[in-house]
Amino acid sequence: MTTPFPAATITGYPRIGRRRELKTALESLWAGRIDTGEFAQTTRSLRVQTYHRLRELGLTEDYAIPATHSHYDHVLDTALTVGLIPSATTGTDFDLGEYFALARGTADRSPLEMTKWFDTNYHYLVPELEDATTFKAHPQHLLTLVSEARTAGHRVRPVLVGPLTLLTLAKTAPGTATSPLERLDELTAVYLDVLSILSAAGVEWIQLDEPALVTDSGEYSDEELAEAAARTYATLTSALPHSRLLVTAPYGSLRAGLPALADSGIGALGVDLSPAVRTLDPGYVDRLAEAVPSSVRLVAGIVDGRNVWANDLTASLETLRSLPQPEVSVSTSTSLLHVPHTVADEPALPVDVATWLSFAEEKVTEVEALAAALSEGRQSRESAFARADRAQRTRAESTTVHNPAVADRTAALRDHDGRRGAYADRLAAQASLDLPVLPTTTIGSFPQTREVRRARADHRAGRIDDAGYEAIMRAEIDRVVALQEGIGLDVVVHGEPERNDMVQYFAEHLDGFATTENGWVQSYGSRCVRPPILYGDVSRPTPITVGWSTYAASRTELPVKGMLTGPVTILAWSFAREDISLAESADQIALALADEVADLEEAGIGIIQIDEPALRELLPLRRVDRPAYLDWSVRAFRLVAANAALATQIHTHLCYSEFGEIIEAIDALDADVTSIEAARSRMEVLADISEADFDRGIGPGVYDIHSPRVPSVAELTELVDSALQSVDASRLWINPDCGLKTRGYAEVEAALANLVTARDAALARIGAAQPTAV
Ligand SMILES: [Zn+2]
């Protein structure tokens, strides 16, 4: 008989390490400071320490700890394990040279494409499927994980991305005739090989993650996916007499996939019961109560894996007890990959805020407390429950959370749609800006030099005073403005040297947000971010960007573009509140930014850009939920600019995504000018733009800033020409794909000079007047 499924578990844990040990190891390996032997040893001890810590925190049962380590990305790992990407494995691990070549590219090979994992800010590598791909089992690294854990005294649960999710995330190489899902049976046979090998090695529980089953927005319908899941899991479970499968469905609720999985023979079903999911699907708990037979262990993900709020243990226990299944396990809604390690590393957080939070470690203790209370009663964990009750109460009553002035202001908005005057009137009023045809500009940031970064750090640490800091930033602005003038750009920017990060910067200057010192979350590979925590009503104590923008304007005759991060992006890249709706938080941020717009205008800044690169990211995974989201997100953006004068030119900027699905929403933002990432996809977005009848200013990026390569005049000309085929010259702007902060000055200077040359050439060809600016 198989060991029963553990009563307390999590479905994944941060891999980067509490002190970002994995990041250090990766960067040392890539820089040649350590060899693969040392890398293997460091990552092994990171894994084993993590297992020990998780046991200390309460995951004591066999198979309670999932082995979710990955050197870079878990989708890449699974794709290699089943041969969806031709595997290069050694006896015990991946061939690291080959592995990192896929992840990061080499001098003569591009890396795999990278894109966002469901509606999160984690990026995975997109496997590419060809007709010639032959799946094959390469379970070596999984066996290594299992045996090294066993040696250290732990029975861990190996984890793979499930076959349906893997196929739906894969893209097909050009010229591939079969669609991914048509290869499901073939792939299932190889998963079976992998699982059988693990089973033969004595592994009793294996986890397969199937988030694809909660979405209906991909290529396949709910029903198609559900039918495929039923078939695949029936095959896998019937052929595995000695091991059982936990299948998880994070990031949403199961619909047609629920009966399909529940009756497929799997041993345990992991479901996402986070507040966000239950708000979108209030009937989910009832459906689970009905659909999951007692032969399947229901693994209730009641501790939120994506957000940072302390769990309301009392309410959670009640939900768990309402489930009719005789035995329920307690878990996290998603992997804890999306939250930082521990609140204990944040001594500088306001004390009250700190007591309201749970990061990964604290969430493990919540899981343990709930599991114990479920079997032995609440009194067995009374102090944890009392603490959780107090956190709920103090947060609900706190005056740092609730600001009546802000609430009144958003309440007064009610039916305000944020519309400005008609575009024709704006266009006429903005003629005074006197811009040339095909105006050139950049997206905002300029290279962040070591000196600039050091000045920020020194200022933060008190090693230089405000005046000293200001002088260094002003010198940088002088240089950036002079550089742009010299190159011949038409609309200049101050370069954003004062910003460490486009969201964190605003969070630091708005009331209602807290920022962390060590709250790192993996974004991809070795790259981590520290999302701010939005805990209270948002207001702006003083102007944020006005001083920098007006200083830049004082140094040039050219128009200076003010630079703001939009409300949706600030929200998307922060941990959001759950005591009020996202829509309401977005309105609050929008109103604070609207005050900034008014102050910029007042200070004489006539062009203001409001960046919304994350608009696509929060798009709900199910189609029915999309209109409501697009409604509030577009409205919040428009509120920022709603009271701007007709003569003020409002720009927005989007990047990171495919825009087809949201092109109408982008149009509805009603910005006067929209710059949009396009170079990397060879101007694919232009088709969507012409289809949507987008009739205001548009700047499809012509310079791919993701690479240090300087695009030649010829390349830039080709992109400008193709843009001119879909966009009328009177509406076209010439700009890079995105900000330049990750680049170096030498390449940026050369690339922007080429961009202006390409623009001039295009002007000459279309016979328009040469620009009068400069
Ligand atoms: Zn961008």
Image (spheres, rainbow, N blue to C red):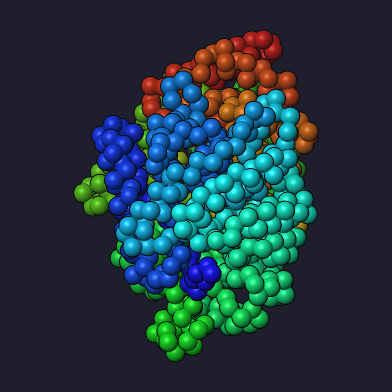
Against 323, residue 684 (above or below) is above
Against 324, residue 459 (above or below) is above
Left or right of 321 on screen, residue 728: right
- Which residue is pictured at 52% across the width and 61% down the height? 205
* Residue 334 position in % (x across, y down): 54, 60
* Residue 64 position in % (x across, y down): 45, 66
Q: In this view, which residue lies farthest toward the left?
A: 463
The residue lying toward the viewer, choosing from 144 and 661, is 144
Asked if one can make out residue 323 in the rendered structure from this viewpoint, the answer is no
Against 729, residue 246 (above or below) is below
Asked if one can make out residue 464 in the rendered structure from this viewpoint, the answer is yes
* Residue 312 position in % (x across, y down): 51, 77
The residue lying toward the viewer, choosing from 490 and 534, is 534
- Which residue is pictured at 43% across the width and 67% down the height? 62
- Which residue is pictured at 71% across the width and 65% down the height? 263
Number of numbered tags placed on the structure image: 0
- Which residue is pictured at 32% across the width and 50% down the height? 44
The residue lying toward the viewer, choosing from 63 and 649, is 63
* Residue 402 position in % (x across, y down): 51, 73
Place residue 695 in its image quadrant: top right
